[in-house]
Image (cartoon, helix red, strand yellow):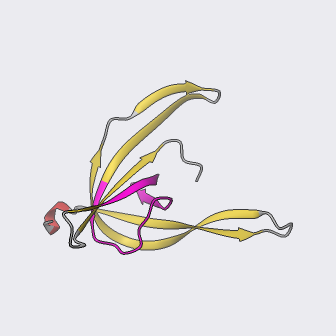
């Protein structure tokens, strides 16, 4: 992977559950990796109607260098949007490149 292809900067967050005063879990997010160089490859989105009205979901692939420990369930913050990571695929072996498949629009945050 050439460095020139990684022309975007993303932030990766991991979920940290804390407990409130009543003992209920409270989800929050903490920075797992900041200022990660990445390439952004958007995919086609979709629109559909639900009880809340018109919903729009967009999918994308982020390409990065190898990051040990990155997993589905984390999220990417990019260009003001939060993208839920659906899967992480190692490409070409030898721990060089990752493809992060993510979606935004229906995130619970």
Place residue 85 in its image quadrant: bottom left
Decide if residue 80 is in sight here: no
Measuring from the top left, give residue 22's x and y in whole percent.
86, 66
Helix, strand or loop for the magenta stretch, by majority: strand
Measuring from the top left, give residue 78's x and y in whole percent.
39, 57
Total tally of numbered discs in the picture: 0
Looking at this view, name the residue that lies furthest to the top: 49
Q: Which residues are magenta?
A: 62-89
Q: Tell whether position 80 is magenta.
A: yes
Q: What residue is drawn where x is 36% and y is 63%?
A: 10
Measuring from the top left, give residue 18's x and y in whole percent.
70, 70
Which residue occupies the foreground of this view, 31 or 17?
A: 17
Looking at this view, name the residue that lies furthest to the right: 22
Q: What residue is drawn where x is 34% and y is 47%?
A: 60
Whether residue 36 sits left or right of residue 23 in the image: it is left
Whether residue 90 sits left or right of residue 75 in the image: it is left
Q: What residue is drawn where x is 22% and y is 71%?
A: 96
Q: Is residue 37 above or below residue 80?
A: below
Which residue occupies the foreground of this view, 92 or 73?
A: 92
Whether residue 17 sits left or right of residue 10 in the image: it is right
Q: Is residue 21 above or below residue 46?
A: below
Measuring from the top left, give residue 87's x and y in whole percent.
40, 55
Q: What residue is drawn where x is 79% and y is 68%?
A: 20
Q: Tell whether position 108 is magenta.
A: no
């Amino acid at each position: 992977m050439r460095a020139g292809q990684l022309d975007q900067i993303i932030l990766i967050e991991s979920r940290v559950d804390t407990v409130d005063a009543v003992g209920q879990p409270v989800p929050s997010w903490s920075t797992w990796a900041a200022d990660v160089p990445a390439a952004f490859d958007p995919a086609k989105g979709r629109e559909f109607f639900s009880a809340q009205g018109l919903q729009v979901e967009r999918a994308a692939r982020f390409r990065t260098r190898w990051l040990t420990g990155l997993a589905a369930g984390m999220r990417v913050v990019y260009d003001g949007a939060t993208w839920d990571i659906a899967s992480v695929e190692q490409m070409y072996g030898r721990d060089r490149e990752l493809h992060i498949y993510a979606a935004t629009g229906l995130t619970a945050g």
